[in-house]
Structure formats: structure tokens, C-alpha cells
Amino acid sequence: MTEPEMNLEWWRSTLVGSAGLVVVSSAAFYALSHLHEDTAGNTIGTWATIGLTVWMISQIWIYATRIKSPHHQLLLMGVSFIQVVPFLFAAVFGSFGYYDLCVVGAENAADVLYFSYVTFTTVGFGDLHPTGICRGIAVAEAVTGYILLGLFVSAAVGIYSHRAERRFNRD
């Protein structure tokens, strides 16, 4: 089996998709974490949580069924791991508002983004902590971080072990 030619045309749809994920997650984060205090709260937070759930299920379906190249999967998972997922979870945390409604101690968008990255990577410094329904969302984010990291490492090992096997068999 020969490796497909890896040129810009081969990568185009994946690069456009990756850029789209970054733009959408950044826009969602900005919009939902900068809501006026009268708008933010349980209703918009619940809708944001439902939207995040639908998005995650659709992304799992796309990665599992539509993306056939492990190279493309690796790039998309890397973008998701580094930027998209933490930004979307931060958007949900921010949509509940501040004043200790979701993340105790968070006072602005930067705080919920920081909390999201700390939770996603399961570092858990403890300076900020979730309350109420956001406790469940934080658990979901931590589990997502574990799963996405495992899939990312698995895809990377698969690509490089396949290359090493081809080189070994060629020699």
C-alpha cells in the first residue's frame, strides 16, 4: 500500500475544517463568556451545555466515521486538544455568569478559560472550583481530556509505527 501524496490539496479540507473549529470555538467563547449579568445564568448555561453535548457527539461521529486518514485525524485531534475543547467548555462555564454561579472565584472570561484548561488537563490547582451543575460539566471536561489525549497518542503511535513497519519491511 502506498502512502497518498501529501500536498496542500490533500490537506486542504482538513486545514479548512481545523480553522473553522478554531474560529467557531473562539467566537462561542467570546460571545458566551462576555454576556451581560442579566442575560447569563442557568437558562443560557443549560442551553450552552446542551449545545456543547451535541457538538461533542457530532465531532466523535465525524472523527470515527468521516475522517479516514490517521494523519488528518491526528491534526484535528491536536487542534481540538490544544484549543477547541477547552474554549468551548470555558464558553459554557462563562455562560452561567460570574459571581460564583458556576466557577467559584472566577471573575471574568480569562478566569473561566484558565479554569477550563486546568480542568481539561486534569491539573486541578484548586484556586478555582466548580459549583452546582458546573461540577458535572467539569467532570465531563476532565474525562474528555483523558479520552482525547488517549486518542491523540494512539493516532500518533499508529502513524509512526506504520511508517517504521514499512521501512523495516522495505529493508
Image: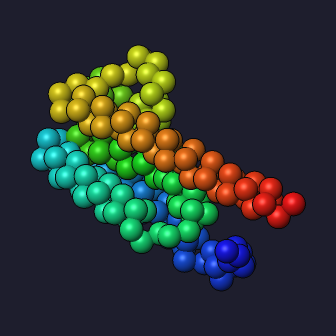
- Residue sitting farthest toward the right: 171
- Residue 41, quarter of the rendered image: top left
Q: From this view, report whether residue 6 is shown above or below residue 21.
A: below
- Which image quarter is the N terminus in? bottom right
User: Residue at coordinates 46% horizontally, 45% vertically from top-left?
Assistant: 148
Left or right: residue 80 compared with residue 49: right
* Above or below: residue 6 compared with residue 118: below
Q: Position of residue 16 (x, y in %)?
A: 54, 73
Residue at x-position 38% and y-position 33%: 142
Indicate the position of residue 106 as horizontal and vertical percent values. Answer: 36, 28
The residue furthest top is 126
Q: How many marks?
A: 0
Give the residue drawn at x 25%, y 52%: 53
Q: Is residue 52 above or below residue 108?
A: below
Query: Can the viewer see residue 83?
Result: no
Nearer-the-camera pick, 39 or 158:
158
Residue 66, compared with residue 21, is above or below; it is: below
